[in-house]
């Protein structure tokens, strides 16, 4: 197939931990073409070949600090950056009618409102975790929570590398949403996010979160259902960031030709 006929994919934040993985996933894929690699303005990667920079050999794509230039002739954007950048990119993707795949976490209610507006014009796929395993775990969490009811206490414990900016992780919140949904609750009303000092007894029916930060942990999530005399623990452990990058690329390809709107990985994976 003529490589120019493949969907063109732009990687935002190409110098980041996830950005490098995303660029590698696109370069490795026979189904997509790397249309651009974008870094922060003034970054010393600007003008250099992205393939060489990530140790893949020359890719023929020069890194840019202009998202607008990168978007020309692109059909999708993979965006694992930060909330402010992601909200700006959503507007650009809407104008370009490009599929916006968002892995960025820590988005506020206002950010999410802006993303919904942009999704009126182009397909937007957003997930706090793009891996198949975690999306399956969310489905299992919903079912177990529904079966066990509010008599069982739910606690979600997550662990990530020392550089992570937000807590609880987007994945932990996604699992919390699934648990709340299974029990017919609204997560914001029952979430207990962080305990310190004389907290008193646990509020019955609440969903607790705890965050561990350290070293190079890629991402671990336990959903603990604690009953009287027994416990059920559902666990996912990520050992390679490539799982998120492959999931994101899959979402970008799935989104080609989709009507504008907001989608998540359960749509992409058909779960
Ligand atoms: P990182 O800090 O290593 O990378 C972010 C990169 O984005 C940085 O290189 C930064 O310079 C770049 N960036 C920010 N604003 C930019 C702009 N305006 N233009 C160009 N580049 C810009 O962080 P990371 O570990 O790669 O994580 C990034 C995000 O992805 C976080 O929100 C993290 O929680 C999330 N994440 C999501 C998943 C998932 O599956 N959804 C998986 C892993 C990480």
Image (spheres, grey):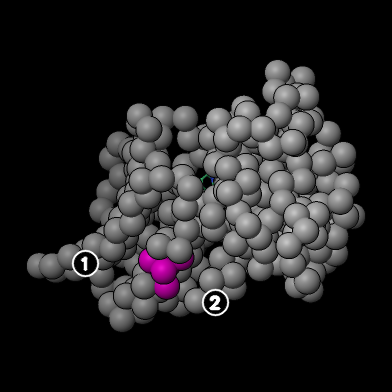
Evaluate if marks 2 and 1 touch, with contact meaning CB atoms under 8 Å apart. Answer: no
Quadrant of picture, ligand 1: top right
Q: Is residue 173 visible?
A: no
User: 7 above or below 37?
Assistant: below
Percent across and percent down for residue 43 are 72, 21
Percent across and percent down for residue 170 are 51, 51
Q: Is residue 162 visible?
A: yes
User: 145 above or below 132?
Assistant: below
The quarter holding residue 124 reads bottom right
Q: Residue at x 10, y 67 (%)?
A: 229
Secondary structure of residue under mark 2: loop
User: What is the number of the mark on residue 179?
Assistant: none
Question: Most prominent secondary structure in the magenta stretch?
Answer: helix
Q: Residue at x 63, y 49 (%)?
A: 26
Q: Earlier in the sequence, mark 2 or mark 1?
A: 1
User: What is the number of the mark on residue 232?
Assistant: 1
Pointer 2: residues within 10 angstroms few (<14), some, or many (20+)? few
Which residue was labeled with disc 2?
270
Secondary structure of residue under mark 1: strand
* In this rendering, position of residue 185 left or right of residue 114: left
Which residues lie in the magenta part? 135-139
Q: Disc 2 to disc 1, how far (Cα)?
A: 26 Å
The quarter holding residue 150 reads bottom left
* In this rendering, position of residue 257 left or right of residue 175: right
Q: Residue at x 63, y 46 (%)?
A: 27
Q: Residue at x 59, y 73 (%)?
A: 267
């Amino acid at each position: 197939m003529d490589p120019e006929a493949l969907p063109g994919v732009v990687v935002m934040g190409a110098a980041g931990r996830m950005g490098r993985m995303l660029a590698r996933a696109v370069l490795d894929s026979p189904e997509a073409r790397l249309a651009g690699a974008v870094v922060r303005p003034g970054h010393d990667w600007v003008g250099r070949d992205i393939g060489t920079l990530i140790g893949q050999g020359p890719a023929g794509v020069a890194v840019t600090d202009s998202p607008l230039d990168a978007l020309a002739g692109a059909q999708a954007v993979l965006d694992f950056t930060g909330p402010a950048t992601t909200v700006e990119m959503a507007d650009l993707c809407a104008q370009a009618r490009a599929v916006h795949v968002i892995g960025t976490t820590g988005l506020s209610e206002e950010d999410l409102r802006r993303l919904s507006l942009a999704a009126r014009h182009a397909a937007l796929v957003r997930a706090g975790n793009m891996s198949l395993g975690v999306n399956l775990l969310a489905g299992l969490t919903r079912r177990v929570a529904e079966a066990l009811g509010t008599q069982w206490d739910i606690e979600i414990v997550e662990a990530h590398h020392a550089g992570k900016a937000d807590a609880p992780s987007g994945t932990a919140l996604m699992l919390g949403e699934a648990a709340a949904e299974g029990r017919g609750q609204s997560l914001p009303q029952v979430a207990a996010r962080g305990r310190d000092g004389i907290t008193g007894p646990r509020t019955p029916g609440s969903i607790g979160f705890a965050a561990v930060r350290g070293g190079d942990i890629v991402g671990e999530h336990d959903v603990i259902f604690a009953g009287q005399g027994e416990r059920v623990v559902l666990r996912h452990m990520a050992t390679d960031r490539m799982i998120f990058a492959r999931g994101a690329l899959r979402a970008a390809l799935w989104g080609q030709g989709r009507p504008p709107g907001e989608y998540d990985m359960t749509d992409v994976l058909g779960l």
